[in-house]
Amino acid sequence: MTTRILLVEDDESLALGLEFNLRSEGYEVLNFPDAETAAVAADSKGPFDLFILDWMLPGRDGLSLMRDLRAAGHTAPVLLLTARDSREDIVAGLDSGADDYLAKPFDLNILLARVRSLLRGRAARPRASAPDEAVLGDIRVDFNALTAEIRGHKHRLTYKEAQILKLLWERRNQVVTREELLQKIWGVEGFIQSRTVDNHIVQLRKLIEADPKKPRIILSIHGSGYKLVN
């Protein structure tokens, strides 16, 4: 079955170049220049296996589009393309539902490797109908549905957040190093920095910790990594 990618990029020359190279890799690509037409296509022409979204779009931006895609139930991973690469911008992008980000200008080979990494993760996602859950106090996480039910309210997880939380759950009360998280979640591409892990942990803490600044579930182990306490 052909892998389908929805690309949203308003720079026509960049969009055409990306579409050409992605198609050369064997992917089916639908290319749109703005959030409005892309949102319609996501619902009417889906499902898609991956979304590649530019942050700065005319009219509604890529972050707004991501929120709408997640709210509409689209669980395919999102690769965010952005010229904004400060820590605050990266956190905002991940918080909106992105699974990974790539700062412009970027190397085409790096983008293609990121695409492969995200698609490998999606292909490895469990497809069985049996529940795959964890219970953390009054929090119930469904790794298949990519949801966390917290005190009666359901919240959506990105795929990467669910992967990280599942690995920490499987190794609960043990230290999981950043290196192991990078290897098992991202596939050890050398260009992925350790702050990528830290940024995802920040988002998970915002979701599941009563006080994200004083975490009691996902603990930082200085100089090593993280430990989920349950």
Image: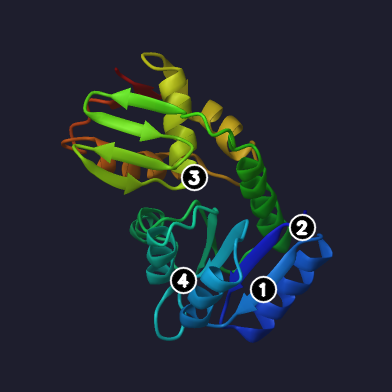
Nearest to N terminus: mark 1 or mark 2? 2
Q: Is residue 80 above or below residue 199?
A: below
Say what amino acid the circle numbered 2 marks: Thr
Nearest to N terminus: mark 4 or mark 2? 2
Q: Which mark is residue 30?
A: 1
Say what amino acid the circle numbered 4 marks: Trp
Q: Is residue 119 visible?
A: yes
- Disc 1 and disc 2: Cα gap in Å? 13 Å
Determine contact: label 4, label 2, CB under 8 Å: no
Residue under label 2, please give it.
2
Q: Position of residue 48 (x, y in %)?
A: 61, 61
Residue 216 position by quadrant: top left
Q: Which mark is residue 159?
A: 3
Q: Secondary structure at mark 4?
A: loop
Residue under label 4, please give it.
55
Nearest to N terminus: mark 3 or mark 4? 4
Looking at the image, is mark 3 or mark 2 nearer the viewer? 2
Nearest to N terminus: mark 4 or mark 1? 1
